[in-house]
Image (cartoon, rainbow, N blue to C red):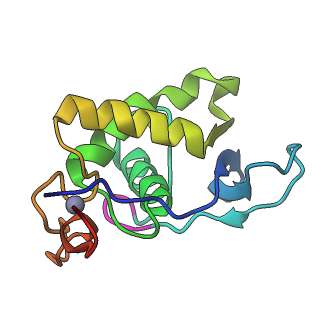
Amino acid sequence: MLQTPKVYRDPVRYRGHRTDQGCLVEVLPERMEGVRAIGIPLRHWVRHSPTGFEWGYGGSGPADLARSILAHHLGDVLPSPRVYQRFKEKVIATFARQNDGQHWEISSGHVAAQLEVIMDEIGAKCPICCDSGYEPESQKKCRCNSEPDYE
Ligand SMILES: [Zn+2]
């Protein structure tokens, strides 16, 4: 029986802003308040957009941002393309409507809630393999398919 993978990370906030150097995205502790707090750069899992992240529409920069946020959320495992493309449409593409598109911030809780909606829509439990049992790119056994202590 396939299990929903656990997320082992502590809750964080993801924050993006536009600079002269491009679109920067940081990961910050959930409880550190204030826009001046400094985070660590979100790892860019490059697939669609070697030139960097983007947001506010449904293109390749936003696809890599959706993929990279979910990869971080899932504990450095890549999500299924079906999942991150929906996350891009529901979340990343909407950022332009906030703060003139220059700045946005979302919490782990928001990511988790959106992920739950998406998995309901897709009709699968595992956001990594969509219940195929194998990771989409590496074809390694998925975490949900190799958990030793499932019932
Ligand atoms: Zn899986």
Residue 104, compared with residue 12, is above or below; it is above
Residue at 17% x, 78% y is 140
Task: Check residue 46 for magenta coloring.
Answer: yes
Q: Give left or right: position of 140 versus 50.
A: left
Residue at 65% x, 66% y is 41
Foreground of the two, 5 or 50: 5
Task: Check residue 103 for magenta coloring.
Answer: no
Instruction: Provide residue 73's location: percent of width, then percent of height.
Output: 49, 57
Instruction: Provide residue 15's location: percent of width, then percent of height.
Output: 67, 47
Residue 49, compared with residue 105, is above or below; it is below
Ligand 1 located in image quadrant: bottom left
Is residue 58 visible in the rendered structure shown here? no
Instruction: Provide residue 112's location: percent of width, then percent of height.
Output: 47, 41
Is residue 144 visible in the rendered structure shown here? yes
Residue at 49% x, 66% y is 44
Instruction: Provide residue 50's location: percent of width, then percent of height.
Output: 41, 66
Q: Quadrant of residue 47?
A: bottom left
- Look at the image and give the residue range highlighted in magenta: 45-49
The residue most toward the top is: 97
> Looking at the rendering, in which quadrant would you find the C terminus?
bottom left
Foreground of the two, 150 or 97: 150
